[in-house]
Amino acid sequence: MAEIYGYLGPEGTHCEEALSAYLGGSKYKAVPFSGIDRVIMALMTGEITHGMVPLENSTEGTVNITLDLMMTAPELKITGEIIMPVRHNLLARPGTKKEDITAVISHPQALAQCRKYLAEHLPQASVYEVGSTAEAARVAAGHGDCVAAIGNQAASVKYGLEIIEADIHDCKENCTRFAMLSREDNPAAAGAPSKISLVISITDRPGGLYQILKEFALNNINLTRIESRPAKRSLGEYLFFIDATGSLEDPVIKNCLQAVQDMSSSFRILGSYPVWGSAGSGNNRSEERTLPSVDELRQNIDIIDYQIVDLLAQRTQMVSIIGSLKQGTQAVRDKKREQEVLERVRQNALRKGVDPNLMERVYKILFEHFVDLQVKQQSCL
């Protein structure tokens, strides 16, 4: 099947500009869709092979609908990204005066990115949301001189509107990150900077998220984004979307992600793809994961030592509670239980690259200590 690219339309959107910049001067077939959900659906049905959608904005943050829809389409992957400066202009039919405008329409993100301007310069105007900035321009072109749109220069040309005022966005460094979606993987070339996007959920336990993030920190893996979204299953249950720099082929990354997966109640890699700005993604900015210094490694070891003692303290407390619950009705020592724990510890040690015989010796020492603890408890009852 020939490659067909879909994007959030109609023609004249920032998304169309991003698609054009992403593909450079190559020829391609593009199809506009009226909503991000339509782009996702077209990818799912095979109507298109790739889809360009907005992912996050420097002013307003994540485009939530994109993340939510991706969770309903597990076969889709992020295969690329592009970060584009976004310039918003006040558009209206030629001859329109700003003081005569009574309604302003645009995409919700565009309206939010121009919130301060609208409050200060168009307090009399009502605000209405539509599916895209280009759709807003099309609607404004079909109404009277009292209706304005927020959109880009391409939309003003496409729909015969005049730029009443340029660059009305509140943050002058406003930019949006767009994601290319596909059903096929697109890993970065060997040695080229790459990024990994994943989504996880964690079991409801104290320090659960900290334990996940600690794995990235200890492996000196840079996280460029972390975002929580409701899992939409029960109140208080969240999904965490994480972007990390690095390649899935890197053994350090691979081991880190395996550890994260082991601690997560659900785990999915959304994509591994070239970093925008690296070779092969549109320009030549490079980014590499540097090795930590000896001092940094020692600091990490100090943190781990603290955590080991803390975890042993927690285990001691739990063993003590179990001992008080037995109250002489059960034997203190359970050889079968100890053997099950040892086998599980050995398997986990093998996965983590730790000597299983060492871990078995450590746990046998712990067993003796905890048995003595429970025996003393029983004698005091």
Image (cartoon, grey):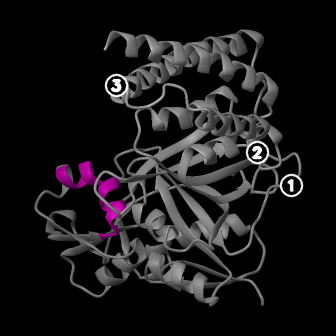
The CA distance from mark 2 to mark 1 is: 17 Å
In contact (CB < 8 Å): disc 3 and disc 1:
no
Q: Which of marks 2 and 1 is in front?
A: 2
- Give residue 299's position: percent from left, percent from top: 64, 12
Q: What residue type is labelled 3?
A: Gln
- Give residue 217's position: percent from left, percent from top: 62, 29
Element on which disc 2 rests: helix
Element on which disc 1 rests: loop
Q: Residues within 10 Å of mark 3 (few under 14, many from 20)?
A: some
Q: Would you name the residue on which mark 3 appears?
A: 327
- Give residue 79's position: percent from left, percent from top: 69, 64
Position of 113 compared to 282: left or right?
A: left
Q: Is the magenta stretch mostly helix, strand or loop?
A: helix
Q: Would you name the residue on which mark 1 appears?
A: 189
> Is residue 143 positioned above or below 192 on the image?
below
Q: What stretch is highlighted in magenta?
A: 106-119
In contact (CB < 8 Å): disc 2 and disc 3:
no
Q: Which amino acid does label 1 sit on?
A: Ala
Q: Which amino acid does label 2 sit on?
A: Lys
> Is residue 221 positioned above or below 107 on the image?
above
Of callouts 3 and 1, which one flags the residue occurring earlier in the amino acid sequence?
1
Q: Nearer the viewer, mark 3 or mark 1?
A: 3
Q: Which mark is residue 254?
A: 2
Q: Residue at x 39, y 14 (%)?
A: 377
> Is residue 300 positioned above or below 295 on the image?
below
Position of 166 compared to 74: left or right?
A: left
